[in-house]
Image (cartoon, grey):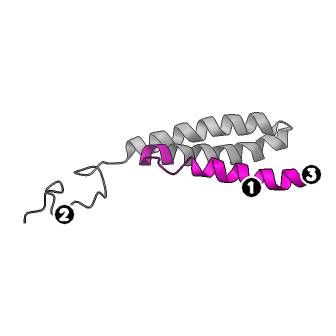
């Protein structure tokens, strides 16, 4: 039991560290999957099958997060890249 108390935070830290270099599409997809999995697990527990509910919720949430990201308008230069004056980061006013 003592090793489980240490293993759970270590596994959580390793899982979260893998999310460090995600682009915006990947972040929105992962956020949708996480939220969908949580809601699906809760709703699935009412019918006695939380695992299936979480699995289905994660799939639907991930797809929803991806579709939401694809529906967002893309600005000139692709976002907040430190570009100034609409010149694509070349400077020179």
Front in this rendered view, residue 88 or 73: 88
Distance of label 3 from label 1 (alpha carbons): 14 Å
State yes or no: discs 2 and 1 in contact (Cβ < 8 Å): no
**Residue that badge 3 annotates:** 1
Q: Is residue 48 left or right of residue 79?
A: right
Residue at the extreme bottom of the image, as rendered: 93
In x, y percent, where is residue 19? 54, 48
In x, y percent, where is residue 76? 22, 51
Q: Residue at x 53, y 36 (%)?
A: 63
Distance of label 2 from label 1 (alpha carbons): 42 Å
Name the image quarter holding residue 40.
top right
Q: Is residue 26 left or right of residue 5?
A: left
Q: Residue at x 49, y 48 (%)?
A: 27
**Residue that badge 2 annotates:** 84
Sequence-wise, the earlier of marks 3 and 1 is 3
**Residue that badge 1 annotates:** 9
Give the foreground label among 3 and 2: 3
In x, y percent, where is residue 21? 47, 48
Sequence-wise, the earlier of marks 3 and 2 is 3
Residue 39 in the image: above or below residue 51? below
Question: SS class of the residue under badge 1?
Answer: helix
In x, y percent, where is residue 12? 69, 51
Question: SS class of the residue under badge 3?
Answer: loop
Q: Is residue 46 left or right of residue 40?
A: right
Distance of label 3 from label 2 (alpha carbons): 56 Å
Q: Is residue 48 left or right of residue 82?
A: right
Residue 62 inside the magenta-drawn segment: no
């Amino acid at each position: 039991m003592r090793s489980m108390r240490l293993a759970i935070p270590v596994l959580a830290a390793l899982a979260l560290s893998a999310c460090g270099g995600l682009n915006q599409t990947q972040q929105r997809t992962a956020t949708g999957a996480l939220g969908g999995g949580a809601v699906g697990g809760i709703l699935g527990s009412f019918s006695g099958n939380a695992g299936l509910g979480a699995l289905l919720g994660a799939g639907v949430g991930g797809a929803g997060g991806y579709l939401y990201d694809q529906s967002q308008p893309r600005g000139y230069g692709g976002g907040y890249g430190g570009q100034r004056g609409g010149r694509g980061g070349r400077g020179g006013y």
